[in-house]
Amino acid sequence: MSADSFRLNVIAAMQSDNLLTNEEHFTFSDGHTKRLEITKTDMLDQNGNVLGVLGIGHNITNYQQIAENL
């Protein structure tokens, strides 16, 4: 995933009133890749100001491989 794409996903999460879920592909320095399903939501203070974005990732690499083999 490119830095620009990642940044756009974070901005979308900060502007949305809902949870956003997308699939992201990561390539590690040794060349192996992982697919993650990432759910993002904004984190607000008591006044509704955005403090940041919370992202939770689930490794779906094996699920995707199984689905492709079926």
Image (spheres, helix red, strand yellow):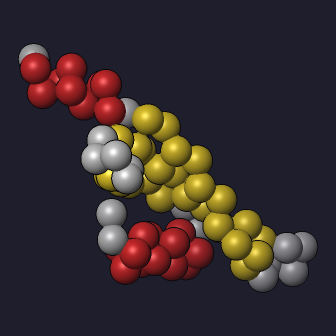
Residue found at the far front of this picture:
30
Q: Is residue 49 visible?
A: yes
Left or right relative to 14: residue 21: left
**Considering depth in this image, is 46 or 39 the residue closer to the camera?**
39
- Rendering coords of residue 17 (x, y %): 58, 68
Across and down, in percent, residue 63 comes to 30, 25
Residue 7 appears left or right of 67:
right
- Residue 70 lies, with reference to residue 43, above or below; the image says above
Q: Return the residue nearer the eye: 33 or 45.
A: 33
* Horizontal and vertical percent position of residue 24: 36, 53
Please state if 43 lies on the left or on the right of 69 as rendered: right
Of residues 12 and 62, the one drawn nearer to the viewer in this rendering: 62
Residue shown at the point (58%, 75%) measured from the top left = 14
Residue 19 appears in the figure: no
Q: Quadrant of residue 32?
A: top left
* Image position, residue 31 (x, y; %): 28, 47
